[in-house]
Amino acid sequence: MGMSRFAWNPITNMWDAESEVWDQLIQAKPEATDLRTKSIRNCDKLMMLYGKDRASGKHAEINQVLVR
């Protein structure tokens, strides 16, 4: 599933999407459940620090935010 139907909300510091989009993502990737309600503090600062660092090559995965 692509991430194009998600948008970053800088006010809430959370990913926004319609409920059906979240449901599809969570069905495909249950580990994404917490991202639906989790605020990512300092995401703007993290993007400034790491936003240009990109993996490349055959097994690179892009457009993913890892939160633990």
Image: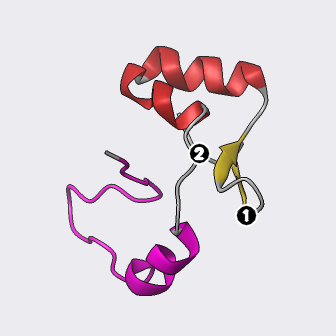
Q: Residue 22: percent from the left, percent from the top?
A: 64, 26
Q: Residue at x 26, y 71 (%)?
A: 56
Q: Main secondary structure of the magenta part?
A: loop
State which quadrant residue 44 falls in.
bottom right
Q: How many marks?
A: 2
The magenta-colored residue range is 43-67
- Assess disc 1: are there few (<14), some (14-19) or many (≥20) residues with their C-alpha within 10 Å of its C-alpha: few
Please give left or right for residue 66 compared with residue 33 in the image.
left
Identify the element where label 2 is drawn.
loop
Residue extending furthest left? 58
Number of the label disc, if any, that sits on residue 10: 1
- Assess disc 2: are there few (<14), some (14-19) or many (≥20) residues with their C-alpha within 10 Å of its C-alpha: few
Q: Amino acid at mark 1?
A: Pro
Q: Residue 2: percent from the left, percent from the top?
A: 56, 41
Number of the label disc, if any, that sits on residue 33: none
Instruction: Compare residues 39 and 22 and report the one nearer the observer.
Output: 39
Please give left or right for residue 34 compared with residue 50 in the image.
right
Residue at image mark 2: 3
Identify the element where label 1 is drawn.
loop
Residues at discs 1 and 2 in contact (Cβ within 8 Å): no
Please give left or right for residue 4 compared with residue 46 in the image.
right
**Vertical comparison of 26 with 58: above or below:** above
